Image: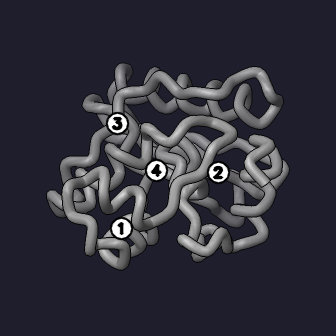
Amino acid sequence: MNAITSISTPIGNLTVEANTEGVRRIFFSEELIEQTGPADTSAKAIASNAANQLTDYFSGKRHTFNLPLDLSELPPYHRTVLKEVINVPFGKTASYGDVANQTGNPNAARAVGNANANNPISIVIPCHRVIAGNGGLGGYGGRLDRKEFLLRHENAL
């Protein structure tokens, strides 16, 4: 059974969903959501660890995440893109074209944007660090004001 937990952050509530393989989703939620049914002990530990690491990130104590991730339900190219996005360091940005180049498909900037728009693991997979080639913010599924906050939090703007 998946484990679910939520935390409050400066940009809204984040809900973490994990299974025994790793974090499956981190998403913005209107309310704080907590586990209502049984969950596997290892899934609970992964969800709790993710919540703690996110809390540390927002308090400025953490710049990288050390979590198992379960991307198994994503299309192969989305997995490839998000594995490249993870490599964009704290405090830095990359363009959609840069990420496309890293995947070996330099003409796939739109596909990179699509993969980022469908990133199920916000913040830990830092799609907020991927910006337009002209330096503009581009899009962000969690709202542009949140993307701007995250980039400012990381001194990347």
Disc ID at residue 23: none
Q: Helix or strand or loop: what does disc 2 sit on?
A: strand
Label 2 or label 3, whichever comes before in sequence order: 2
Residue 2: image quadrant is top left
Q: Is residue 73 left or right of residue 82?
A: left
Q: Is residue 15 above or below residue 113?
A: above
Mark 3: give few (<14), some (14-19) or many (20+) Cα within 10 Å: some
The amino acid type, in three-letter code, at marker 3 is Leu
Q: Which residue is mark 2?
A: 14
* Among numbered discs 3 and 1, the one appearing first in the sequence: 3
Residue type of the residue flagged with mark 2: Leu
Which of discs 1 and 2 lies nearer the camera? The answer is 1
| Left or right of 56 in this view: 79 | left
Residue 68: % across, % down: 35, 28
Near mark 4 (Cα within 10 A), the count class, few <14, some 14-19 or many ≥20, is many
Q: Which mark is residue 112?
A: 1
- Badge 1 or badge 4: first in the primary sequence: 1
Q: Is residue 35 visible?
A: no
Query: Mark 2–mark 4 contact, CB under 8 Å?
Result: no
- The numbered dot on residue 121 is 4
Marks 2 and 3: CB-CB under 8 Å? no
Residue pointed to by mark 3: 69
Q: Tell me whether circle 1 and circle 4 mark residues in contact (CB < 8 Å).
A: no
Question: Which residue is more in the foreground, 67 or 30?
Answer: 67
- The x, y position of residue 66, in whole percent, is 47, 22
| Closer to us: 5 or 154 | 154
* Label pair 3/4, CB-CB below 8 angstroms: yes
Q: Nearer the viewer, mark 2 or mark 4?
A: 4
20 is higher (above) or lower (below) than 6: above
